[in-house]
């Protein structure tokens, strides 16, 4: 007898776990001689079948929490949202304009997502001290370095898609945020279907 | 600057369900909308697990809210994006066990008197099935909290023995034993065979 089921031995000597393991066999008409005759095993099978039926109802149950739960969770989450460091934007007027690295990452991810068969995943944005990191660039304007990981669909992604991602990310950085993309490290970390 | 929603519209954004790993990777970057998708996807199963563990909708919702906030705070510690769902189940299970330990020692006996664990009664369900469901709920309430957790995670939520063992800080052999005992007890309480 299996020690883990100690205490669940039937009067006939079989334990309940064995009856459970053999339930499908017996139901398929492959009962052994003992199983054909034993009323203890028969009664245990009835109970286990009933348990299995009701368990099936629990599995498909779709009882949902109250409708307000998602928004309660999300307001707590937003209160602790990580914004990342701020990147200074070029400004012709007095007064500073800054944008969070997290907001830049969101725009760049959406730009990469617009390429068919590409889903952006992690996007890390670092703002660069332009004078030391890129001394050959003309002064003025913020420069960012970005590392972006993506997943691609092996069905719909086209050759050259990575070049299109680079182009759209660079365009979004200058056109939509007003920072220059100094460097983009692109990693394809996964494939997905559809 | 254009807000992310205005550049939305890539083919992957329209109607397409993003895979978990993509959403988790984005959420780790601090992308709140990506995390909201994960909340919408998994609050239901976590709520149903907590509801059946605690037999109280209010306590179950409190647990789910806690779990998603804690997980958001600790997303950076997650080693692998694919481990996210297992981590949710583990966190939810542990919160439920803590709630039960903090209750008055006598209150486990009151579980049956608590709110009904039964999925809301459906017109298409027969009286016999309703009665079986009620019997299962009373039987579940008589298991120890650890047994109940093991049985629910395995039989209703389909988690692996290894994952359940990790959630409960037990060996997978011990988990198999608890599930076998729980199954035998539940079946016998529903329809006694001796």
Image (cartoon, coloured by chain):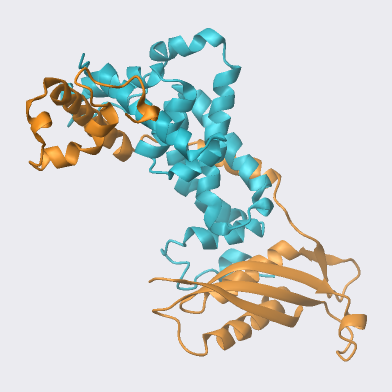
Chain colours: A orange, B cyan
Q: Nearer the viewer, residue B141 or A85?
A: B141
**Figure quadrant of residue B81:** bottom right
- Horizontal side of A54 relative to B32 (left or right) equals left
Rendered residue at 78%/70% (across/down) = A126
Q: In what quadrant of the picture does the N terminus of chain A appear?
A: top left
A189 sits to left or right of B185? right
Please, is residue B94 above or below residue B20 in the view?
Answer: above
Residue displayed at 87% across by 89% down: A138
Q: Residue furthest top?
A: B106
Q: Position of residue B170 (x, y in %)?
A: 54, 35
The residue positioned 42% from the left and 29% from the top of the image is: B178
Across and down, in percent, residue B28 comes to: 64, 57
From the viewer's perspective, is A15 left or right of A170? Answer: left
* A111 and A166: which is toward the camera: A166
On screen, residue A78 above or below B103: below
Q: Quadrant of residue B16?
A: bottom left
In this view of the protein, can residue A148 be seen by the observer?
Answer: yes
Determine the image quadrant of residue A158. bottom left
Image location (x, y in percent) of residue B71: 62, 44
Q: Give the image location of residue A22, x and y in percent.
A: 20, 38
- Please name whichever residue, A191 or B164, is drawn nearer the observer in this view of the structure: B164
Task: Count the labels in the image.
Answer: 0
């Amino acid at each position: 007898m299996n020690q883990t089921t100690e205490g669940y031995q039937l009067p006939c000597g079989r334990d309940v776990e064995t009856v459970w393991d053999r339930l499908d066999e017996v139901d398929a008409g492959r009962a052994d001689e003992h199983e054909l005759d034993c009323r203890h095993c028969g009664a245990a099978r009835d109970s286990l079948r009933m348990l299995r039926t009701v368990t099936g109802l629990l599995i498909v149950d779709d009882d949902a929490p109250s409708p307000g739960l998602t928004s309660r969770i999300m307001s707590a989450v937003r209160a602790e949202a990580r914004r990342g460091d701020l990147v200074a934007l070029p400004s012709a007027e007095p007064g500073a304009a800054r944008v969070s690295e997290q907001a830049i990452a969101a725009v760049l991810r959406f730009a990469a997502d617009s390429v068919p068969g590409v889903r952006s995943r992690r996007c890390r944005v670092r703002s660069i001290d332009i004078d030391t990191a890129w001394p050959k660039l003309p002064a003025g304007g913020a420069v960012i370095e970005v590392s972006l990981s993506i997943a691609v669909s092996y069905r719909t992604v086209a050759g050259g898609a990575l070049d299109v991602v680079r182009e759209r990310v660079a365009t979004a950085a200058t056109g939509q945020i007003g920072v220059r993309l100094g460097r983009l490290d692109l990693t394809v970390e996964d494939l997905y279907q559809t | 600057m254009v807000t992310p929603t205005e550049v939305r519209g890539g083919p992957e954004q329209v109607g397409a369900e993003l895979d978990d790993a993509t959403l988790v990777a984005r959420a780790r970057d601090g992308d709140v909308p990506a995390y909201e998708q994960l909340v919408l996807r998994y609050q239901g199963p976590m709520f149903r697990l907590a509801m059946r563990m605690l037999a109280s909708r209010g306590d179950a919702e409190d647990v789910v809210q806690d779990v998603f906030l804690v997980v958001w705070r600790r997303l950076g510690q997650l080693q692998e994006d694919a481990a996210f769902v297992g981590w949710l189940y583990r966190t939810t299970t542990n919160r439920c066990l803590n709630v039960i330990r903090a209750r008055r020692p006598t209150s486990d006996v009151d579980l049956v008197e608590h709110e009904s664990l039964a999925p809301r009664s459906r017109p298409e369900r027969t009286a016999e099935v309703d009665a079986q469901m009620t019997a299962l709920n009373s039987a579940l309430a008589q298991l120890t909290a650890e047994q109940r957790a093991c049985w629910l995670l395995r039989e209703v939520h389909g988690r692996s023995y290894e994952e359940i063992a990790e959630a409960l800080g037990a060996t997978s052999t011990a988990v198999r034993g608890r599930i076998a005992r729980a199954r035998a007890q539940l079946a016998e309480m529903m329809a006694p065979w001796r």
